Each structure stands twice: as structure tokens, then as C-alpha cells.
Image (cartoon, rainbow, N blue to C red):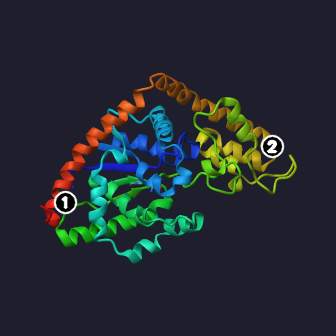
Amino acid sequence: MANRRVFSGARPTGKQHIGNYIGAIQNYVKLQEEFDECIYCVVDLHALASLQEAGDLHANSYEMVLDWLAAGLDPKKSIIFPQSRVSEVSELHVVLSMVTPLGHLFRVPTFKEKVRQQPDNVNYGLLGYPVLMTADIILYKADTVPVGEDQLPHLEFAREIVRRFNNTFGETFPEPHARLTTFARVMGIDGVQKMGKSLNNHIELSAAPQEVEKRVRSMMTDPARVYRTDPGHPEVCNVYSLHKFYSPERLEEIAADCRGAKIGCVDCKKMLATKLNASLDPFRQRRAEFAGDPNLVWDILTDGANRARAIAVETMAEVREKVGLA
Ligand code: TRP
């Protein structure tokens, strides 16, 4: 396949947190250097499937994209756009639904999870979520998809749909593959669950320095370490796991000092907060600059949608021809 294209999507969840950054955004930024073209999509249609958690789509899209830009996504290199502004994706979703085995959809883990989470609103959109996600990716013939581990079943699903489509109508789409970050998953400050806004166990990228300190101070550490003089176990400590990302140059020293009880959890957290704030400072500055121009985000999204649509229209013309629609 000549073109090497990246596509990823994220639900508009407003201000992003360090879990989003470590798990996804930093990868988005890096891939801009490695690939001919990267497309990053605010999947607002997907968000509609869980309306109660979607909140204000407009504001949440704006805040998320502002964070993306501040983190280094460059609209000159990448296409950044809202999913709903390229309606071809909905048409492709319908066509793909005809080669989608229903049984497979019911087995998708995220669907089962949603059924548990919102038993009163098990809508078709939830079931069809992976079909729409497949449409997202292949509408742009992307072959590389930066996502978290939890999305792997969706990509496996997408490959199956691509194979079915290609077998039925002739070779059209490349099979998309996941590109995982090396950093598996970022736990929340509770140390128990994955970092997430809805659990309020997160640290926002744009949080004020004092807020970052406060949240780091409240982080769960090694539960076996009760007294300052107890030896610590960095391998089970959530503060240490963030040091891996934010203090790579001092990692061995921190681990040894923790094991030897030379530093206490309070010291260790202070170090982390300092590192974290130092890394967030330039981000906060860029964000404030970008926010000074109220049209910036919307102009970027409009331009992105135009560029995305140009590709989508071509793919849909080919799809219509392949499946025999006039
Ligand atoms: N399902 C993804 C998530 O919940 C979001 C998403 C939608 C996506 N479409 C996509 C991710 C296409 C990658 C590619 O995080």
C-alpha cells in the first residue's frame, strides 16, 4: 500500500488529563513525524450513543482540541476535524452494516460493558459503534491506528469487516492495525481504576500548579508502606509508575531510595509534582496563547473537515461503484 496514513478518533471529553496524554496524545504528536498524513477526529457522532456522559458536545470538542494543539498537534501536518462534519462516514456505515455479522457485534466487549453501564438505554448506536468506527478508519484508507489496549477488539473487528468487504466487492480497503503506546495504562490517583474524568481520579493537563500538587498529594501509594521507616515497593506504587514517565533520568535512584526508606511517600510525591508541573508549564502557556484567539479551534476544525471530506468523497465514489450503486 503506497499511502501510509494514520487515523485516530477520540470522543469529545473536554479538558484532557495526563492519562489521555501518556496513553494517546503523545503518540498522535510523534506519528506526525513518521507518516505522510495523520488524521485526528473528534468522534462526536460516537458520543451521541452515550448522551448522558457526552455533556456539551460543542464545549467538550473545543476544550479537547485546544489541549491537542497545546500538546503539539499541528494542523499544518495533520487533519483535525469533527466526525459529524463529513457525512460520508454515515453512508459508509450503512454500507458496511450489510457485511457485518450481527453475532460478532453482540460479542464485542465494550458493547457488553455499555449494556451493564446503561441498561436503560441499550440503543442501536451502541451495538453499531464498531461499525461506525470501522467506517471512520477506512473512509480514509488509513492503515495505522493509534489507540489504547481497550480498543484492540474494535480493530480486530474492523479488519474482519474489511476482509468481508474486499472479498465481496473486490479489493478496496487496506486492513488497519493498532499502534499501541509503550506505556500500557495510566491509573487514576486512587491507584485502583484507570484514570478517567468520570471517576474524578484524574490530573488535567491544564490544571493550575497548586491543583496538580494537591492531586499528587492525595495519590495512593504502596499500601504496605504504613510508616515512613517501612521499606517501600516501587513496583506496586502508582506514584512511582508516573515517575517512570516524568522522571526517567532519576528512576533508579528513586526506586532505591524508596526501597531503602531513604525517602518517604511525601518526598516522593513532592518530586513528582515538581516534575509534572515543569513538564506542564510550556503546555499551559501554549494553551493560554491559543485560547486567546476564540476562532482558532473552529477555523482549524473547518479546514480539517474540508480536507477530510475531499478524501472521503473519493472513497465513497469508489465504494458506490464497487457495490453497484449508480
Ligand atoms: N472507540 C474509540 C474510543 O472510545 C474512539 C474512536 C472512534 C476511534 N472512532 C475511531 C479510535 C477510529 C480510533 C479510530 O476511544
Q: How far from the left and from the top, in percent, is residue 214?
A: 73, 37
What amino acid is at disc 1? Val
Name the residue nearer the viewer: 326 or 204.
326
Rendered residue at 16%/54% (across/down): 317
Q: How far from the left and from the top, in percent, is residue 288?
A: 53, 25
Rendered residue at 82%/53% (across/down): 225
Which residue is at the far front? 120
Q: Is mark 1 within 8 Å of ligand 1?
A: no
Name the residue carrying label 1: 319
**Image-quarter location of ligand 1:** bottom left
Name the residue carrying label 2: 264
Q: Is residue 189 visible?
A: yes
Disc 2 residue crowd, few under 14, some 14–19, many 20+, Cα 10 Å: some
Q: Tell me: residue 22, above or below residue 69.
A: below
Residue 208, label in figure: none
Quarter of the figure with residue 305 = top left
What amino acid is at disc 2? Gly
Query: What separation in Å lies between label 2 and label 1 (alpha carbons)?
Result: 61 Å
